[in-house]
Image (tube, helix red, strand yellow):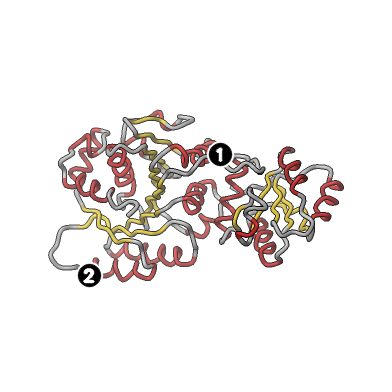
Amino acid sequence: MVDSQLRAVTAIHGAEFESFVASTLYGQGWSVLHRALDWNSVIEFLEACGSLPEVLLCSTDLRGIDKEKLNDLATQGVRIFLFRNTEGFADEFPSSIPQPGSALELIGLVRGSIRSPLVRDSVVESRRLRAKVVGIASAHSSAGCTTLAINLASEISISGSRTLLIDAHAGSPSIAILLGEQGLHTARGFQQLAAGFWAIEVTQEKLSESLTLLDNALYEFDFIIIDLGAIYELAQVLSGRRWSGEVMVWTASHADELWVLSKSDPTGIHRLKKLVQDLNRNSMKPSITFIQSFTKSARRATSGDEAFLSTVKVLKPKALLRYPLDSRAAAAAQNSQETLFQSNEKSFLRKSIQGLSGEIGR
């Protein structure tokens, strides 16, 4: 999804950072109307332009910057991003924010602003982030992503935490089907599934509304579990040019952890190698944990175990976990459209996922 109608003006003192901001916006298909070198240039352009841009990105060290005029522009509907390059400007400009460290962070920041307009004044946002966000993805299809996401969210909610489960499978959303909650397809907000347990399904039709809800969910829930499904061509996904990649962009900007599942058979290892290469080339906020899925109990390491470890160690992951094969328990839960806790809380798979839930945040 390209924000082709978005118009921006940059007013940034540092040439290197300004070039980074402008090129990132250009790369997303946005229109950079003017690149001001000082505050007088900003005012002259805006007076001659006739209509205000949607976004103004400026720096605290811009020559002649006027706080009063900034506030005036904000009240007229312009989204103001006031970047500081040192903490020395924090007291003088309390609404300023640190310069983003990557294109992905900048994109996420601007997109979030367009969905939820920011009022940039001297009043500091009083709400505090509370949610721990974990994305669940896989290197290939049928790795157990959805079953793990559903039951991780279930286990966390059972422990007493407010938990949100997000179905971000663009091509084949299945949480509603697996839990018998058909209302998820059309719900315009969070749908409660059980005590302390909510869910939402992201669709193309509800995309903008859903992303705004996710921004708000950061303040409303203790944990957010996102079922991302299989990731292919990560760089294209993170470009934000396809609606189906928007939640992955949001995850890369906001999540604390990204759990990546893969089987250790030849096909799984092949797909995993490609994803690891892509992850190595594309920086993102969350720490990464790799999960070897559908493992069988064995006393000795197999060739698949060794190939899995060899493939992922280049990224120095936060943790390496194992997700067992228990097709009987998984099938029983699917047939009854229940979580593993509801279907058979004593099953090996349920106890294993219960153990995995304890790894979040360690």
Using residue 26 as the reference point, say whether residue 126 is left or right of it.
Answer: left
Q: In the orientation shown, which residue stands out farthest toward the front?
A: 91
Q: Residue at x 72, y 38 (%)?
A: 75
Assess disc 2: are there few (<14), some (14-19) or many (≥20) residues with their C-alpha within 10 Å of its C-alpha: few
Q: Residue 134, position in %: x, y?
A: 39, 49
Residue farthest to the left, as pictured:
299
Query: Is 175 displayed left or right of 280 in the figure?
Result: left
Q: Residue at x 51, y 54 (%)?
A: 237
Q: Amino acid at mark 2?
A: Ser
Residue 213, percent from left and from top:
50, 37
| Type of the residue with mark 1 | Ser
SS class, disc 1: helix
Q: Secondary structure at mark 2?
A: helix
Place residue 306 in its image quadrant. Answer: bottom left
Query: Could you say which quadrant of the image residue 150 lies in?
Result: top left
Number of the front mark, 1 or 2: 1
How many residues crowd around disc 1 within 10 Å: few (fewer than 14), some, or many (20 or more)?
A: some
Q: Position of residue 183 (x, y in %)?
A: 40, 28
Point out which mark residue 208 bears: 1
Residue plotted at (30% across, 37% down): 160
Which labelled disc corresponds to residue 303? 2
Q: Are marks 1 and 2 in contact (CB under 8 Å)?
A: no
Q: Is residue 74 above or below residue 362?
A: above
